[in-house]
């Protein structure tokens, strides 16, 4: 969802990539709630950091506790930022209905959007 928001808001300025510690596949609930918000992530796919080889990154944003604990080392020029969002699939396990499951994803979708908008605002203002 974070890559989707980054591409939606600032695709012309940033080249966002998304990767995880493990591949889990593209979550259909994430696709659905992002579509509701006007962002199509249906062509995204699950990747690991290894798939990017020796690519240099300006920023690495870890979105969950497990990623922060397992985050590999990056060169000093890479700024690593940890934001501990809840994991939507874990939240949705407690849901009793499809709508409750979707609401778990909507909550995290909206939190990620707020973070991405703030991140982009801060980057722009710090570079001016």
Image (cartoon, rainbow, N blue to C red):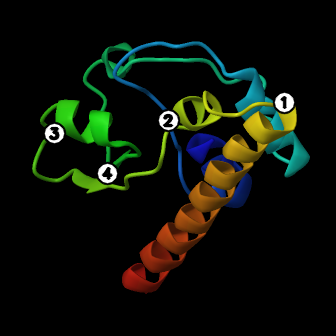
Q: Which mark is residue 74?
A: 3
Q: Are marks 4 and 2 in contact (CB under 8 Å)?
A: no
Q: Residue under circle 1?
A: 98
- Circle 4: is it few (<14), some (14-19), or many (20+) Cα within 10 Å? few
Q: Nearer the viewer, residue 119 or 128?
A: 119
67 above or below 50?
below
Which label belongs to residue 17? 2
Front in this rendered view, residue 100 or 73: 100
> Looking at the image, is mark 2 or mark 1 earlier in the sequence?
2
Query: Which residue does the image show at 67% across and 54% down from the upper left?
Result: 107
Q: Residue at x 86, y 38 (%)?
A: 99
First in residue order: circle 4 vs circle 2: 2
- Which quadrant does the N terminus fall into? top right
Q: Which mark is residue 68?
A: none
Please tell me whether mark 4 or mark 3 is closer to you in this view.
3
CA distance separating discs 4 and 2: 11 Å
Within 10 Å of the Cα at label 3, are there few (<14), some (14-19), or many (20+) other Cα atoms?
A: some
Q: Between marks 3 and 2, how big is the CA–CA gap?
A: 15 Å
Quadrant where the C terminus sits is bottom left
Measured Cα–Cα span from mark 4 to mark 1: 38 Å
Could you give the CA–CA distance between mark 3 and mark 1, rounded to whole angstroms? 39 Å
Taking the image as drawn, is residue 6 in sight? Answer: yes
Return the residue at label 4.
58
Residue 125 spot, x, y in % from top left: 46, 85
- Residue 40 picture location, percent across and down: 82, 37
The answer to whether mark 4 and mark 3 are in CB contact below 8 A is no
In three-dimensional space, the C-alpha distance between marks 2 and 1, rounded to whole angstroms, equals 29 Å
Instruction: Estimate the x, y position of residue 111 in percent, counting from the top left.
Output: 60, 60
Q: Secondary structure at mark 2?
A: loop
């Amino acid at each position: 969802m974070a890559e989707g928001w980054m591409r939606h808001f600032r695709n012309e300025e940033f080249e966002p990539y998304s990767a995880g510690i493990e591949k889990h596949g593209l979550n259909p609930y994430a696709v659905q709630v992002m579509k509701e918000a006007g962002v199509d992530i249906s062509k995204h796919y699950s990747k690991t950091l290894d798939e990017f080889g020796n690519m240099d990154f300006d920023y690495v944003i870890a979105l969950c506790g497990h990623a922060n604990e397992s985050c590999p080392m990056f060169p000093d020029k890479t700024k690593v930022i940890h934001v501990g969002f809840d994991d939507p699939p874990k939240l949705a396990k407690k849901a009793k209905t499809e709508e409750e499951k979707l609401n778990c994803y909507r909550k995290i979708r909206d939190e990620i959007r707020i973070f991405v908008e703030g991140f982009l605002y801060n980057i722009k203002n710090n570079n001016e």
